[in-house]
Amino acid sequence: MSFDIEEVKASLIESVPQLEEMLDSLIQEASHYMNEASRETWLQNAQGIAYLGKGQQVVVSYLEAVPQVIARIDDEILDDILETVMKLSSVTSGEVVSLVLDSLPVVSERTGDIDLLRQYLALVYQIGSKTPRGMRPMLSNIDELMSKLTVSGLRRWAQWGAQAHARNFQAQIDYFGLASEDSKAVFQQQRKGSLFIDYHRPINFYLRAFWARDFFIRPAAADYDDFKPYFENMAMHLPDALNDLGEIKGGELYRAMAAHMASHLAYTKEAISMEQLNPQQMFFIELIEDARVEYNAIKNFPGLKGLWKKVIKASMEASELPEKSTAYRLEQLALKLMDVKHDLQDEQMMVVAERFHNEIEENLDNEKWSWDLGILLYNVLNKATSKWESLTEISQQRFGYRDDNRLVWASDEWAEMEGGGAPHQETVRKNVSLMEMINEIDSELVDVDHEEVWVLGSELYPYEDNGLSYNEMEGIEPVSDPFHYHEWDYRVQLNRPNWVTLYEHRAKKGDPQLYNRILDQNKGIAHRIKQIVDKLQAVGLQRIRRIEDGDELDLNACVEAITSIRMGHEPDPRITMKNVIRSREVSVVVLLDLSESTNEMVDGGDKTVLEVTQEAAILVSHAINGIGDKFAVHGFSSDGRHDLQYTRFKQFDEPFDQDVHSRLAGMKGGLSTRMGGAMRHAGSYLEKQSSKQKLLLVITDGEPADIDEKDGQYLKQDAKKAVEELQAKGVYSYCLTIDQYADKYVHNIFGQNRYAIVDNVLKLPEKLPQLFANLTT
């Protein structure tokens, strides 16, 4: 249906007569900022708002405010504004809706970003739903609020007032009108020293003066402690507000951040492949790559060294690191790489520093050299370290201006970035036969920069066979591409998008005979498992006898009935039978907690928690396999939100054979328990199954926890949210825990009748198969 502007104008004027004198001028003004399609949508949306019956002023406010917003943001916001107007119309008056629309030009000017404006629209609807009496006074003070607060700060200020004065209407009016003492106190608490919007243009001019080119810069909501700048959608994302760092003002911090990120763009010609790298290796390569681009920048603009060192010094004064920690040693190395005169007393770190300064002039534009030097650093530390510190602890360098380095690694955006160089060429993986591998291959081991990698379906052994394959002797542990999952923050009642990074690791193999030994050691349990299997096994066609409404006569029952009649007794009327097809449509993921605590000895026993969990996993897998249900066995542990480690011991589509037995025998425990992300990942596999019944069975020995989260409730609330999300997708979650104190939290996470606590850990192998049977019948 074609758009008739005259018809739409007539319809609007009929609904809002006062538009007759101003509509043409409004359309003329909108043409400066909006293309034809956007103007059509704008007018059609106004027509729809007029039909809501919330008064003429709402339509006028919409037509006046939206072009001003589009001038500063993007026309993609049109649908969001319309949706907010429609939702607000159901909870508040037309006058308040008009005030919301009138506030949008101010908010868009102070944010300058479509995502932040969307957050503001979501906040407005939330306040309008919970504390509608606070809307009018808040919107009356929006100029002052947005001149001092970010959208995140405004949200925290508003949510505090809504919660504190939920039942006191006058207190709501005073709080949101900035008239009460507690409102002023929270307002001051949420203020930050420097807002991005005040420094946006100066930063652009600053970078243009250095590199004679424009950079896309956008604000990002920095409402959590470890926020780092990042690069996404061809734009640098800097925090929407910064507090002063000691004597360094926020504006100076913005310059240091922007200059570092611009250095990456200016001196990086191609991305580095992350294939075959573990998270620690990636971190060390990033550290060297940071040093390489900063060396280039300092060589061209020497004053940047003073700026960056000034920020580093202030960061060091603001917090402390143990001098013997790996993080401190790496921090000193980074300073040595930036400034050759820095006094570095660490002999191991000097090996890397000397090579860096000896070779940097020949490798100014060589990202591959950063890869080599990063792996050298990893190997130097690996030889001297018996047990690695966690990645979260290692990465605590006090460099308050560096970004999260996602730009270092290969991504699709490289093909589109102006000045970013050629797109990264992904490595081609080719499956080959043994003879092709032997006759054609140049190197048995893979280098990440090879354009083509040949993959052999089985292990390749050297000629002098000592029982170890090339992979086992020298290969790099394969790691999957990263999976990103959101995480629920109960404190602000919002999901943190792409907050958790999960990597799938190949399961290590152990002794496959462990499977048979466990069955032999648990013959009593194995016998009960056989009974469970016989009871639950899908037997296909089954004959049900002695029923009243069957399909055919049951001859035995007929004979007994005739006998009863001749003896003068009342016959049993159930003399028919029928054939039914008995089947089970069940898919289950057994998800094992493989954290460090599983290495502890069981009280009163000679086994570790991991060994007992291993026995239980093998026995329940034996039972499920006998029943014939589709199942998978996965495990997880975590080292902070950037490294959630996930292992698949058995997948849905593979047989329960000796390879699976050996993987189950090779499971190891370590690190922490970030449960929510692991459950979401396990749920993603269950969602792909066509079975009617989908079960996620979590086996754990403790509550969710991780080294980078000090709030004891945060990860529990996220796990609870994960259970709710999976339930909405048809996945039933159940927890079997051996934590004797789990009553305090497991009910809140999984819900009523969705968990079991095993008081005696040694009885876990006995209880698990029966529990599965109860859950799936």
Image (cartoon, helix red, strand yellow):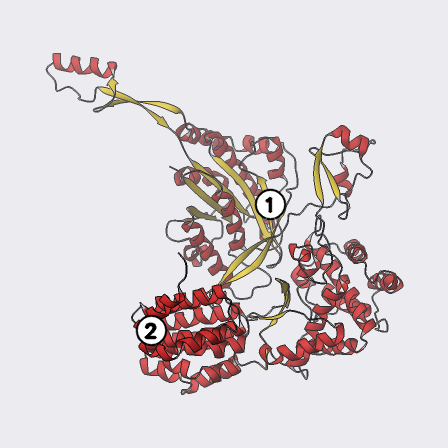
Q: Which residue is mark 1?
A: 647
- Helix, strand or loop at mark 2: helix
Say left or right for 371 vs 626.
right
Foreground residue among 577 and 604:
577
Residue at the spot x=75%, y=75% of the render? 210
Q: Between tags 1 and 2, which lies in front?
A: 2
Q: Is residue 154 visible?
A: no
Assign the N terminus to one quadrant of the image.
Answer: bottom left
The correct choice, above or below, for 536 with respect to 704 in the image is above
Using the rendered view, name the quadrant where residue 248 is placed: bottom right
Q: Which residue is mark 2?
A: 13
- Residue 61 location (% of width, % of height): 39, 77
Assign the C terminus to one quadrant of the image.
Answer: top left
Q: Is residue 286 visible?
A: yes
- Residue 284 location (% of width, % of height): 74, 59
The correct choice, above or below, for 227 with respect to 421 in the image is below
Q: Dot 1: few (<14), some (14–19), or many (≥20) neighbours within 10 Å?
A: many
The correct choice, above or below, for 638 with respect to 249 in the image is above
Residue at the spot x=34%, y=75% of the render? 132
The span from disc 1 to disc 2 (Cα, nearest Å) is 64 Å
- Residue 178 location (% of width, % of height): 42, 85
Disc 1 marks which amino acid?
Thr
Disc 2 marks which amino acid?
Ile
Say left or right for 432 vs 300.
left
